[in-house]
Image (cartoon, rainbow, N blue to C red):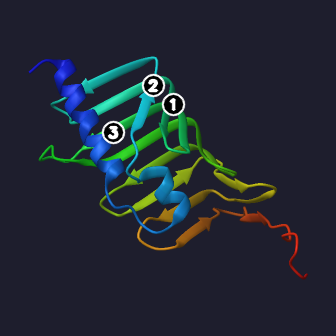
Amino acid sequence: MSALQNSIILLLLLLALFAGDGGSHAFAEQAVGGSEVIRISSRSLEADQAAGTVRFVGDVVAVQGDTTIRAEELILYQTSEGQRIERIEAFRQVRIEQGERVATGQKAVLDRIREEVVLTGSPKVRQGADFVEGDEIVFFLNSERSIVRSKGNERVKAVFHPRKGTSE
């Protein structure tokens, strides 16, 4: 089998991952799940069948429905059986956009085994003028739950503006 055929097979596995049943946490689910086609573009693509990885490098843009993931590098890790993607890592200038919601950081890791997405490297999640930031933001894919952590003497920061039409 040629390297191109192996790349196509791994990309089809990625499509299966994105089409699988995600969790109910809307932002994280939309960022990594759903049934729509995903399109990935980058300056280069490296497939390593022995390592079970596909690496997109340079100006990576992954689009699925109304969700866009941008990074300088995106690596897909296949299970040892080669049947599905177990982990996706995005590096450097990571930006996940869905409508008004934007998550940024220097690294994002989607772990399908633990069913979580972890953002690190000055992560920040913003919706309109509201935002939350810390040293690590974790989205749990099977529940409507997330955790924002800070390290050392740093503190988690959050700003929430009242919605129009609500009493204060």
SS state under label 1:
strand
Residues tagged 1 and 3 counted as in contact (Cβ below 8 A): no
Where does label 1 land, which residue?
A: 61
Instruction: Tell me the number on the disc at residue 41.
Output: 2
Q: Quadrant of residue 82?
A: top left
Where does label 3 land, which residue?
A: 76
Mark 1, other Cα within 10 Å: few <14 / some 14–19 / many ≥20 = many
The kind of residue on which mark 1 rests is Val
The kind of residue on which mark 2 rests is Ser
Residue 146 pos. (x, y %)? 55, 69
Is residue 105 or residue 150 the one in the foreground?
Answer: 105
Classify residue 78 as left or right of residue 160.
left
Where is the N terminus found, in terms of image quarters?
top left
The kind of residue on which mark 3 rests is Leu
For discs 1 and 3, the disc positioned in front in the rendered view: 1
Residue 47 pos. (x, y %)? 26, 25
Residues tagged 2 and 1 counted as in contact (Cβ below 8 A): yes
